[in-house]
Amino acid sequence: QVQLVESGGGLVQTGGSLSVSCAASGRTLSVRYMAWFRQAPGKVREFVATINWNGGHAFYADSVKGRFNISRDIDKNTVYLKMGGLKPEDTAVYYCAAQSNTANGYEFWGQGTQVTVSS
């Protein structure tokens, strides 16, 4: 099992920046990918960004490409999402997720952290 705890988030004005982080614990050696997803009110959860835990290769949703940056600190077992150029449509609960090296999808999820962008 891998436990994920998000922190950060909050309220920011349009055009501002905000960072969220996710600390992993438990069987972290089994983690292959970590990712951020988000869910806005009344909408389905959507993919935001993912990073290969060992190689550091990242991939982004088109909606955030060029504005968001995902990174990880292996020593701290933490993944970060730095968000810039925020828009009201970025308002959502942001969830951290982890995929182990034996799974085909993200099987571990954090509790989520709220990000609100005011217009």
Image (tube, rainbow, N blue to C red):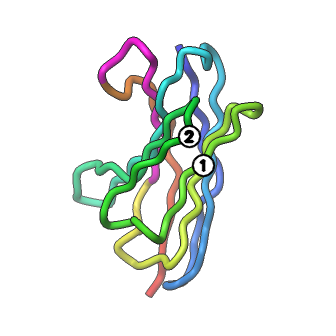
Considering depth in this image, is 83 or 11 the residue closer to the camera? 83
Q: Mark 2 belongs to which amino acid?
A: Gly
Q: Residue at x 45, y 35 (%)?
A: 97
- Asked if labels 2 and 1 touch by Cβ distance under 8 angstroms, the answer is yes
From the image, tell me which residue sits under label 1: 71
Q: Say whether residue 76 is left or right of residue 31.
A: right
Q: Is residue 100 magenta?
A: yes
Looking at marks 1 and 2 on the same chain, the residue that comes earlier in the sequence is marked by 2
User: Which range of residues does the magenta coloring cover?
Assistant: 94-104
Please state, as top left, top right, bottom left or bottom right, where the C terminus lies in the image. bottom left
Circle 2 — which element? loop
- Residue farthest toward the right in the current orientation of the protein: 75
Q: Position of residue 17 (x, y in %)?
A: 60, 74
Q: Say whether residue 103 is left or right of residue 111.
A: left
Q: Residue at x 47, y 31 (%)?
A: 33
From the image, tell me which residue sits under label 2: 56
Circle 1 — which element? strand
Q: Residue at x 45, y 41 (%)?
A: 35
Q: Residue at x 30, y 63 (%)?
A: 62
- Image quadrant in which you'd find residue 90: bottom left
Considering depth in this image, is 87 or 56 the residue closer to the camera? 56
